[in-house]
Image (spheres, rainbow, N blue to C red):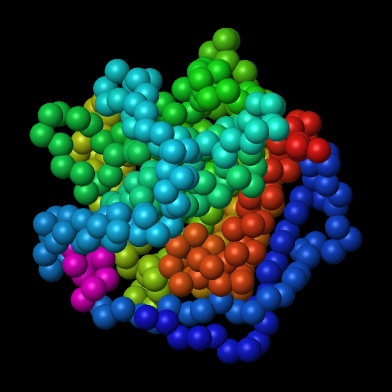
Amino acid sequence: MSSTSNNRQGRIWIHRPFEVTPSSTATKTNPSISCCPLPTKTLKPPLENRIHSLYQSGGSEALWQWCQSKQEFYNSQFSSRVATDDSDRIQKRKLPSSSSFSREVDVTIYLPKSKPDYTKLHHGICLHVHGGGWIFGDSQNQVAHRCLEMTEIMNVAVVSVEYSLVSTFSDNGQIFDPVNEVGTAIDWIENNGADELNTKPVYVASGESSGAHLLLLAMLQRRDQFDTDRRPLTSTWKCLNLLYGFYDLSGSPSVRSDGNDSSPLCGNELLCMADLYYEKMLQEGNQDDQFREKIIDLQHPSVSPMYANLSNLPPALISVGTADPLIDDSLFLSSRYSLCGNDVETVLYEGGEHGIGHFGLQENDEMGRRAREYTLQFMKRYFEECGLTDG
């Protein structure tokens, strides 16, 4: 359900660091402001259909059924979003775990279209981590059309991670370890990805919503691995694209004050999903007793990257809409990211809801298209700075 926006133009604020990347130049005004029509507004669903209400009334079984219905919807959409001849560019692969406690990690790999007159290697690899509140989503049916778009715009291979979900039931002792599963994909890309996928060894990473949360935690783990055989994180990974992420699982002010107001996702739903993730980590995660004792609340840096040491990370683009209850997460993270000495570019989309440019009613509105295009051009810029252009 939706309501059309009025005719007033919506604003897009872009705040760049004053010392920007080598191929770009600092603008005289910071932030720069552009305009386009306000995006379509999603109407509120009935309260009983909200995630937190379903879980409170029906428990895990109701949550599982809701997740199943979401997955069935994405499965049904796949054939209309992905052309038959494009399905040949999608591969499934299992990666050996980098943790002795974790399972093999499934990934979906997307490749650019073959070009008869194009003999160069692909420009590099984009690691992708999908959203879904840690409770639903997958690396193919939900995001294939967007991952294929990334391959074409940037001429890269996209590796999308199929990480463990809160709603997944395991009867074989498998642990819940989505951060290390993303870390396994990071390790494979660095050690084997370029050779196996015939790309240049140039890497960027992108995550949406809960995927941005897991991606940032996995990058922090990678940064702290002081292996003499590994290059520093910032020389290996050129940039991070962090889209409307959840970085403070205790609830930032905008999440806590939202209540049931926002759509398609409200603050109370976000808090419910954060609690479910936290409880699953404590019950089934890969932590020893000493580690469990340290995680006394949702602000522990291993759970909420907002409270981590954010130094020595790649340049980042942090994007969020002004109608997203997670707006404070992005704004606060952007400030901390910069204060820790990293380059960060922040973009705000007026009227943008959770998922703008990637799912929901605002996926293909003009502002949604601009949001998506801007993130793709941001990542592409870092390949261009490595001299990887098609001319």
- The image position of residue 357, as x and y in percent, is 54, 63
Q: Residue furthest front?
A: 116
Q: Is residue 54 shown in magenta? A: yes
- The image position of residue 316, as x and y in percent, is 64, 45
Q: Magenta segment range?
A: 48-55
98 to the left or right of 278 = right
Q: Residue at x 52, y 46 (%)?
A: 148
Instruction: Count every numbered label the image shows and give the total.
Output: 0
367 to the left or right of 120 = left
Q: Is residue 213 above or below residue 228?
A: below
Q: Is residue 39 above or below residue 282?
A: below
Q: Is residue 311 shown in magenta? A: no
Image quarter in which the C terminus is found: top right
Q: Is residue 315 above or below residue 103?
A: below
Q: Residue furthest top?
A: 229
Closer to the camera in the image, 118 or 262: 118
Q: Main secondary structure of the magenta part?
A: helix
Q: Residue 178 sits in which quadrant?
A: top left
Image quarter in which the N terminus is found: bottom left
- The image position of residue 203, as x and y in percent, is 61, 31
